[in-house]
């Protein structure tokens, strides 16, 4: 049976490309300190409490998904969104594209009684014929420990290389067990699904999706994070949510301009602070 490669956060990031090529997934153990996850949980708690549970078999009535992480969780924005493991993985998996961006970021809560989610591939969201290359690189951060009892996400290592008509059989999916502060990286063509929660307490996670710049993002990030909201953020992160050209002649704004011009104009127009003199 295939296994999930497990890499250390400090000295094994260079092994991410080989792991993703062969298995379509890997776990970076203890990628951040547990305190980072505690901060994210505290920042998101009031917003999650006001979020409705999912509906239907896929979304799950025992699951809550809360968005707007970049504004609601400064810790996520500054410490996870452009984490070096994400950048290393995305730069490898989507090296064939001129750009790749953040596509989706949600805070997930999985509660007792939620059954197994059916195994799926994230690229199915495009509703398109099969892609000949990987167009997604995604991540699941463990805000709490991921255990068999609390519904650790199940993956089918190597399934990103299968023919399109092949489906997992019983026993081919395995749980991505990992400690708080670890992250599961997986490609968009990998079969995976949430596990059944039969234990105590909620399983908490941050899920991010990343896609090549020439495809639509899962969320309309430029509506969620308009120029007046993001103007003070780091330029790299602003570009990462879509304020840049996606190719030589793709993603223009207004008069064939780079979308980042909208940020620069807002910065110039914003009132300047004075010292009162």
Image (cartoon, rainbow, N blue to C red):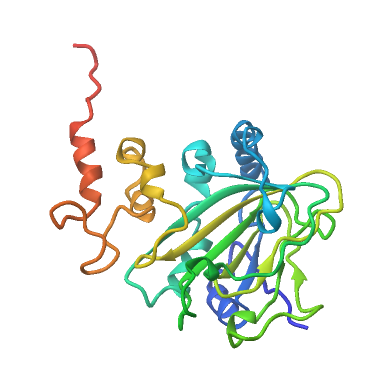
Q: Quadrant of the N terminus?
A: bottom right
Q: What residue is rendered at 71% in x and 60% in y? A: 194
Residue at the far left in the pictured view: 255
* Res. 173 image quadrant: bottom right
| In the image, residue 56 above or below residue 44 | below
| In the image, residue 11 above or below residue 22 | above
**Residue 272 point in image, percent of width and height:** 22, 25
Q: What residue is rendered at 75% in x and 59% in y? A: 152
Q: What residue is rendered at 18% in x and 32% in y? A: 269
* Res. 271 image quadrant: top left
**Residue 153 point in image, percent of width and height:** 72, 62
Taking depth in this image into account, of 71 and 125 the one nearest to the observer is: 125
**Residue 239 point in image, percent of width and height:** 33, 53
* Res. 121 image quadrant: bottom right
Q: Quadrant of the C terminus?
A: top left
| In the image, residue 196 above or below residue 21 | above
Q: What residue is rendered at 56% in x and 75% in y? A: 189
């Amino acid at each position: 049976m295939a296994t999930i490669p497990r890499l250390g956060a400090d000295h094994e990031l260079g092994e991410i490309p080989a792991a993703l090529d062969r298995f379509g997934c890997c776990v970076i153990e203890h990628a951040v300190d547990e305190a980072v996850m505690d901060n994210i949980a505290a920042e998101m708690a009031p917003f999650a409490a006001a979020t409705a549970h999912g509906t239907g078999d896929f979304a799950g009535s025992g699951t809550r998904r809360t968005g707007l992480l970049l504004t609601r969780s400064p810790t996520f924005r500054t410490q996870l969104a452009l984490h070096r493991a994400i950048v290393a993985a995305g730069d490898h998996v989507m090296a064939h594209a001129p750009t790749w961006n953040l596509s989706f970021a949600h805070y997930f809560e999985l509660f007792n009684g939620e059954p197994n989610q059916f195994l799926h591939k994230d690229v199915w969201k495009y509703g398109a014929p099969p892609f000949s290359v990987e167009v997604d690189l995604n991540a699941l951060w463990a805000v709490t420990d991921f255990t068999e009892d609390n519904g650790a996400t199940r993956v089918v290592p190597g399934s990103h290389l299968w023919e399109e008509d092949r489906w997992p059989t019983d026993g081919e999916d395995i749980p991505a067990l990992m400690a708080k502060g670890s992250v599961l990286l997986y490609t968009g063509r990998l079969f995976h699904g949430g596990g059944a929660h039969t234990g105590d307490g909620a399983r908490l996670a941050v899920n991010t999706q990343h896609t090549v710049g020439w495809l639509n993002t899962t969320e309309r990030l430029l509506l969620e994070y308009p120029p007046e909201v993001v103007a003070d953020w780091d330029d790299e992160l602003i570009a990462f949510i879509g304020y840049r050209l996606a190719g030589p002649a793709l993603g223009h704004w207004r008069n064939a301009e780079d979308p980042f011009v909208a940020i620069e104009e807002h910065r110039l127009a914003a009132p300047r602070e004075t010292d009162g003199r």
